Amino acid sequence: MGKPILEIKNLSAKVADKEIIKNLNLTINAGEVHALMGPNGTGKSTLSYILTGKPGYEITDGEILFHGRDLTTLKPEERACAGIFLSMQYPVAIPGVASNNFLKHAVNAKRKYEGKPELDAAEFLKLLRGVAKDLDISAEMLKREINVGFSGGEKKRMEILQMSLLQPKLAILDEADSGLDIDALKIVAEGVNKWHNNDNSLLIITHHQDLLNHIQPDVVHIYADGHIVKSGDKNLAIELEKSGYKAFVDTKE
Amino acid sequence: MAQKAEILKNLDEKYKYGFITDIKADTVPCGLNEDIIRMISAKKNEPEWLLERRLKAYRHWLTMKEPTWAKLIYDKVDFQALSYYAAPVQKKQPKSLDEVDKNLLETYNKLGIPLKEQEALAGVVAVDAVFDSVSVATTYRAQLAEKGIIFCSISEAIKEHPDLVQKYLGSVVPYTDNFYACLNSAVFTDGSFVYIPKGVKAPIELSTYFRINAKNTGQFERTLIVAEDDSYVSYLEGCTAPQRDENQLHAAIVEIVVMNNAEVKYSTVQNWYPGDKDGKGGVYNFVTKRAACRGVNSKVSWTQVETGSAVTWKYPSCILQGDNSVGEFYSVAVTHHKQQADTGTKMIHIGKNTRSKIISKGISAGFSNQTYRGLVDVGINADNARNYSQCDSLLIGSACGSHTVPYVRNRNKTAVLEHEATTSKISEEQLFYCQQRGLNEEEAVGLIVNGFCKEVMQKLPMEFAIEAAKLINISLEGSVG
């Protein structure tokens, strides 16, 4: 077992005075793939926003450590540069900003943070072409304005492209499989598997099993009512697929 | 933890180009009267006809009142407290850059426009650099002269090409046009003159940098561009000004005459000192810019990036007189802190099949206020005239204002006029998305804003576009936090 990358201890948090996360505990070690499964609308995405520092969420109790360091004092961009990546459920469009230009800014922001020289246009393009090819992203698509008029599948592939470019230590995939057909799902999964190694870790947030057929989880957590109600190995996801959430949530209560 | 896309923090960054060059200025006493005008004219060794024009304009100006219709609030200018002429003291007219005052060249270096380098850059841009009021260095003139192109200061043109100047000066913007134009006609000191002969395409982009320097000196720039039949020219103008506490008045006139099948592109990056975060100091910019498409198929496009000035009053316009002539206006205006801008365009359709296009992008931050004010006027004979207007506003923070005032006057049934307008805010979702990818808030705002004005930025010549993008980012520093 690798060293812990992410440790969430007794976390409670609220948004707009409503308590969403209630006493949540989760440790993810290097090399591990965790799946967080739960019904829609129960605050799974909230957890991803709290981890990445999105404004508007207030931590009322507990702590979050990233590589043993308190995460909550860092700005969103510092968390990103330190190695936390969130593949968003609904990536937002930024009109007028070409995807390749956006990606170059992102890559260079991280390099700057790490004290490395920024890549010039030619160097970046070389890097980008290699990664884009694996995800079946064309040069044409890279010229389009980021997420503007993208299909669901295109958006998700663009997210994974960014993950591959930025090489995070912890990637959170929030409903990375929604809106994907089987072929696109495979491409996304292959991209993730290619990135994943013993040194980094993955938190997959999903409400169904599809993606987990392609990315093998080490630990599956069932999430309900603001915390984890049950954890197990990959068989738990299969069990869940058969019996539905109701069995687990009801059991608890 | 709650970081809202709110303004008002970290607002103390200084105007990057705020420095004063130590050069003796040869100024005339403060105040405005006929004697002062005679003195300016005498200092410039002007012919009698020009003095007469100046005096005529001055006498008319005395009868005029400052316009008040713009959505601008500012302390009235005391015209008697200004000095109307300042020229850097130099022994003789320099023949090359080596003869130019070193301090002056240093000033340009600080602005990032080293003339020496530009000269060495083998004919990319020709610079007729204006420092305060008098041209101090002109490059590439010989290269242009081979093609018959005249590119010099208006003062020189008055001496060397009096027939052309007499024919066209004031023909697009008459001295009676408006209060500030009338003042300019009385007291203008210098500016640029461009003449492109029939059938000639200017081989390089023509460029001028302007800079206000001497204390309390109004800058009354006067530019005249004439493009004869079948000619083409792209002209660039860029401005910065050193930091001052007093308001500095800038009331320029730019006139463009375009004949049959000719095309003029006029691009501006305006970066006059905008005042501090409390609105103190800063340049008043009351400019009259107008182009007359006099020939068939003539075309003019104005592209402007406005980031500076405390107060901007500016409506680059096109008179589409010749049949099939085309007028375009592409504008990005950025206001921050307590800046105010009332800017837009006028498209006057007179000829048949005339077409115009207006793309205006306004970005407001801080406590600034911005108004797009435009007129599309279609005359009785302008059959099949077409206009497309698009005015987009982007707000940063919740204390700024943005207003759109599109006037339309149509007297021809065959005209087709379209207008679209949007107002949006930089969303927290967009900011967060950029931050999640490692960009800090300022980088994120810069990227989003540059995306917002891409349509206009693309119209700028490449090297100008890069400079303009940087300027926009500098202007918006500290707008979120």
Image (cartoon, rainbow, N blue to C red):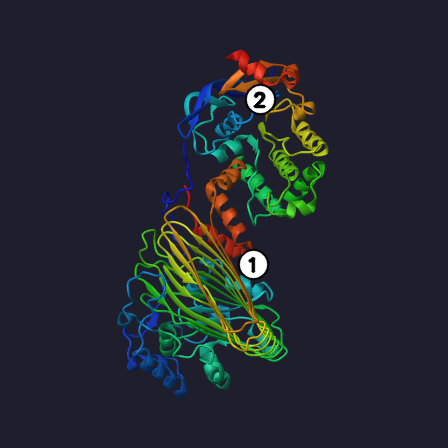
Q: In the rendered image, is residue B397 in sight?
A: yes
Q: In the rendered image, is residue B39 in sight?
A: no
Q: At numbered mark 2, what does the secondary structure look like: helix, strand or loop?
A: strand
Q: Which residue is mark 2?
A: A36
Q: Chain of mark 2?
A: A
Q: Tell me the amino acid under the disc marked 1.
A: Glu
**Residue A30 vs residue B43: left or right?**
right
Task: Pick whichever, B321 or A225, lies toward us.
Answer: A225
Q: Chain of mark 1?
A: B
Quarter of the image where one finds residue A246: top right
Q: Which residue is mark 1?
A: B463
Q: Is residue B343 above or below residue B184?
A: above
> Residue A55, percent across and down?
44, 34
Report crowding for label 1: few under 14, some 14 to 19, many 20 or more residues within 10 A (C-alpha): few
> Residue B277, percent across and down?
34, 51
What distance separates the C-alpha of mark 2 from that of mark 1? 50 Å
Q: Residue at x 52, y 54 (%)?
A: B453
Q: Quadrant of the N terminus of chain B?
A: top left
Q: Residue furthest bottom?
A: B48
Q: Quadrant of the C terminus of chain B?
A: top left
Q: At numbered mark 1, what does the secondary structure look like: helix, strand or loop?
A: helix
Quarter of the image where one finds residue A153: top right
Q: Nearer the viewer, mark 2 or mark 1?
A: 2
